[in-house]
Image (cartoon, helix red, strand yellow):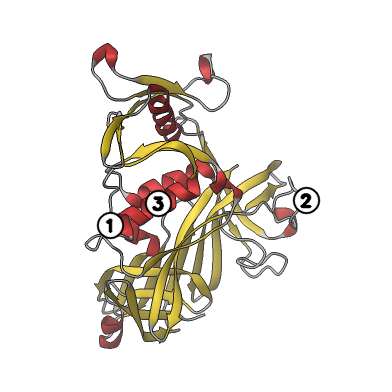
Amino acid sequence: MQIEVYRMTAEEDTLTITLEAVCDTFSSLLWDIEYYKCGSFEVYIAANPQNIDIFQTGRIVGRDDDNQHFGIIESVLINTDIENGDYLTVRGRFLMCLLERRIIHPTYNVTAAKAYSEIVREVVTQNALLSDNRRISGLSLGTVTGTCWEQTATLQISYTNLMQWVYTICEKLGGTANIRLVKSSGEQYRMVFDLSEGADRSIMQEDNPHIIFSDAYSNLLSFSYAEDSSVQKNFAYIFGQGKGDERKRTTYCDGDEPTYLDRYEVYVDADDISETEQVEGETIPIPEEKYLELLRTRGSERLALPKTASESDIAAHNTQYVYNRDYFVGDYVTVQHRRFGMMQPQIQLIGMIEGFDQNGRSLTPTFKEA
């Protein structure tokens, strides 16, 4: 596996990508792919004039064995040490971080039910593809895969960070978003924005081969599990525009209304959701029931399940299940620890830190209850 470093020059709708260097002598590499947030990377490499010239902020870092994830160098730290030598610590995030440079403006409004795939693609188009000054050069819309993106909603959103909002929708639906590089011709590349969904490879289904991590199979090297119910919110009071008793309001919960000790309430201030919309250049009021539906959509985004997390070390060189061949970040798998009598029959792999150093390759996954 080699690290590739590219120089990126953006000009309106095109990207010129020049391969600056190929590195295979780094001390360590962490490649952290995340499902519900922007992934990141870290390179630890000897500091010398050549490497300092190669690893500059704003350049792109890729791997010759990964055509889905590319990072932008955001920070470079030089440490000098007489005993241990001089080293560079190069850090950055994957290309989705480009959307963090935009907020959602002007207001995006949908009062008739529309698929989330269309909503997200339209919001990204409005804020990162159209305007000359706000355009992210070379970015285009890619593919949509997964039934989760077929869910429909009405919503209104404004002045929210674009990347954070996209990941909020991803976590709400169970899907993910990614920006990858696609070569068009010569040194011309496009950045492609994709929406997708992980596959179910757990024992709870029979369509795909089962992926089971277990101490009994010697592919689960270490195991930790944590649960936190303090973050749970399952009933929302949503308040829109207006003053005092005339303020528009509604409630939202997923399924039957929770009661007694099972009820965790949250207040949602949705004063930014306007009671009017623009139709063919004319400002018209939004019917009350449609407005309340917009409030309920906002409330649904503020609910939170009890926080569960499971981190493990799994066998990186296990031939039974090969990462990025038999299973991927976002998939549902089964984790079993027989010594503790614990079985998680359907748990989602939401992150994978792939590490390379003098000890070889390691895999550290993060799981979340389905």
Q: Residue placed at 30% from the left, 64% from the top?
A: 136
Give the Cα distance between marks 2 and 3.
Answer: 36 Å
Give the percent coordinates (x, y) of residue 56: 27, 76
Earlier-in-chain disc, 2 versus 1: 1
Q: Above or below — where is 181 with respect to 99?
A: below
Q: Secondary structure at mark 2?
A: loop
As drawn, the label of residue 206 is: 2
Q: Is residue 265 visible?
A: no
Give the class, few, some or many, for how many residues have Cα within 10 Å of label 3's Cα (few <14, many ≥20): some
Give the mark, 1 or 3, whose residue is nearer the N terminus: 1
Left or right, 40 with respect to 64, comes to: left
Q: Callout 2 environment at 10 Å: few (<14), some (14 to 19), or many (20+)? A: few
Of 238 and 321, the residue lying toward us: 238
Q: What percent of the width, then of the height, locates residue 170?
A: 48, 47
116 relative to 242, above or below: below
Q: Which residue is mark 1?
A: 101
In the rendered view, tell whether residue 25 sits above or below residue 314. below
Label drawn at residue 122: 3
- Residue 367: x and y in percent read 56, 49
Describe residue 114's horizontal placement relative to residue 324 as left or right: left
Q: Of residues 354 and 179, which is closer to you in this image?
A: 179
